[in-house]
Image: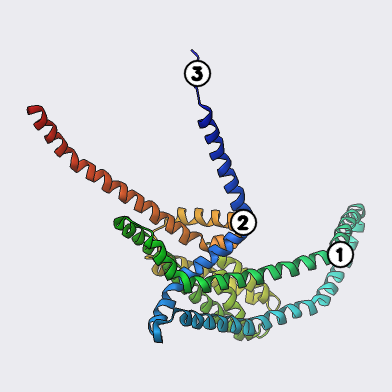
């Protein structure tokens, strides 16, 4: 049996226009993903800083929000300046030390190569070695020929990072100043007060999730950074080859990378280990032992205690949101993935609560309808 489905021309055209609209919107969003990441990062920072800026504005003459935002920015810039002044020179110093130690490494390698050369001659491995060396030579030539291009690309990337950082800072600044005004205009568009209050409640809950998560994560990162810096400073006492001024870069890198959920702390520990290995392999071993022990304490006691009331996400939801955020938007997506997932959860819970209330109200109306029907039938 054949079934014939007739679709009028208008419906057919409307369907394809809607589908085309979704495709165009998806392409536009993908093309503007860099700008959207910058705006989203600025919005994330504005939500996180809104509480401190608002509290500071209440204590200023005239409750000036612009002045409180400017003061906050001065504090942030001073902190970044202190970080650059204290952390960058030791890193440059250790890099220079590594470069200066390369001749010793090369001499050691040559000494070992003489012994290895005898083994190659004894077991007739010279053709395989020549082939491997030829491949390495070709790769080195290609790398050398593209060195200039790589340097230019690196400088361009650095300029892009600096420009993006400045754009985010300016966007955040203006969002903090103009945010309350724009929110008043948005709430003024509502004609249904009940719906407006419902949406305002959801917005407050989402703001609380973002601000609470940022505050908690900054606290956890600050504690980890303090312990990392103290550990490196103690290692400089135990191993004289380790300079004590590495404590500040270790604390700074731990603080920055631990802001990335799940595996950011591991990245920071790997970089610190690279800085320590230039001076002492034993210090690296001791630091890795400390890192493993501290991670167990942080994951089981510190972080759950601080973040327990910030969000109600399960470990699976956290891992899934971090994975999606990193694959879509890189490190920035990984950092903001958990509060975004918390906001999505709030929206879902609000929708479920509204549906339950609606179903409950419909259930309470049914007995009255039955009584009315009986009365009508009796008449």
Q: Residues within 10 Å of mark 3 (few under 14, many from 20)?
A: few
User: Vertical placement of 14 versus 270: above or below?
Assistant: above
368 or 155: nearer the viewer: 368
Q: Label 3, on which residue?
A: 4
Horizontal and vertical percent position of residue 254: 57, 73
Q: Residues within 10 Å of mark 1 (few under 14, many from 20)?
A: few
**376 with respect to 239 (left or right):** left
Quadrant position of the C terminus in the picture: top left
Residue 32 marker: 2
Mark 2 lies on a secondary structure that is: loop
Mark 1 lies on a secondary structure that is: helix
152 or 16: nearer the viewer: 16
334 or 348: nearer the viewer: 348
User: Vertical placement of 246 versus 136: above or below?
Assistant: below
Residue 144 marker: 1
Q: Who's the residue at 59% across and 43% down the image?
A: 23
């Amino acid at each position: 049996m054949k079934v014939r489905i007739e679709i009028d021309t208008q419906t057919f055209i409307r369907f394809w226009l809607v589908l085309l609209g979704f495709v165009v919107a998806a392409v536009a969003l993908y093309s503007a993903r860099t700008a959207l990441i910058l705006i989203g990062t600025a919005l994330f920072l504005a939500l996180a800083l809104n509480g401190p800026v608002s509290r500071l504005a209440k204590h200023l003459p005239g409750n000036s929000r612009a002045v409180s935002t400017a003061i906050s920015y001065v504090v942030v810039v001073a902190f970044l300046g202190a970080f650059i002044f204290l952390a960058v020179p030791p890193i440059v110093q250790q890099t220079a030390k590594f470069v200066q130690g390369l001749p010793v490494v090369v001499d050691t390698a040559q000494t070992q190569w003489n012994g290895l050369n005898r083994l190659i001659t004894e077991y007739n491995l010279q053709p395989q070695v020549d082939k491997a060396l030829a491949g390495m030579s070709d790769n080195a030539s290609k790398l050398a020929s593209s060195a200039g291009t790589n340097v230019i690309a690196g400088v361009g990337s650095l300029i892009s990072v600096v420009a993006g950082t400045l754009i985010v800072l300016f966007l955040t600044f203006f969002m903090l100043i103009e945010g309350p005004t724009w929110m008043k205009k948005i709430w003024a568009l509502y004609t249904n007060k009940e719906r407006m209050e419902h949406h305002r409640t959801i917005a407050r809950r989402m703001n609380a999730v973002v601000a609470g998560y940022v505050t908690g994560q900054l606290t956890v990162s600050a504690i980890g950074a303090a312990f990392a810096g103290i550990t490196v400073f103690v290692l400089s006492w135990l191993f004289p080859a380790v300079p004590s001024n590495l404590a500040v870069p270790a604390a700074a890198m731990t603080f920055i990378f631990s802001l990335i959920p799940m595996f950011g702390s591991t990245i920071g520990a790997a970089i610190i280990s690279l800085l320590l290995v230039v001076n002492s392999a034993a210090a690296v071993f001791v630091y890795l032992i400390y890192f493993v022990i501290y991670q167990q304490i942080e994951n089981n006691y510190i972080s759950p205690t601080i973040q327990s009331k910030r969000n109600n996400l399960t470990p699976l939801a956290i891992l899934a949101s971090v994975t999606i955020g990193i694959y879509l938007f890189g490190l920035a997506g990984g950092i903001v993935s958990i509060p975004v997932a918390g906001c999505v959860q709030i929206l879902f819970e609000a929708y479920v609560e509204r549906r339950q209330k609606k179903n409950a109200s419909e259930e309470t109306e049914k007995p009255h309808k039955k009584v009315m029907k009986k009365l009508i039938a009796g008449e």
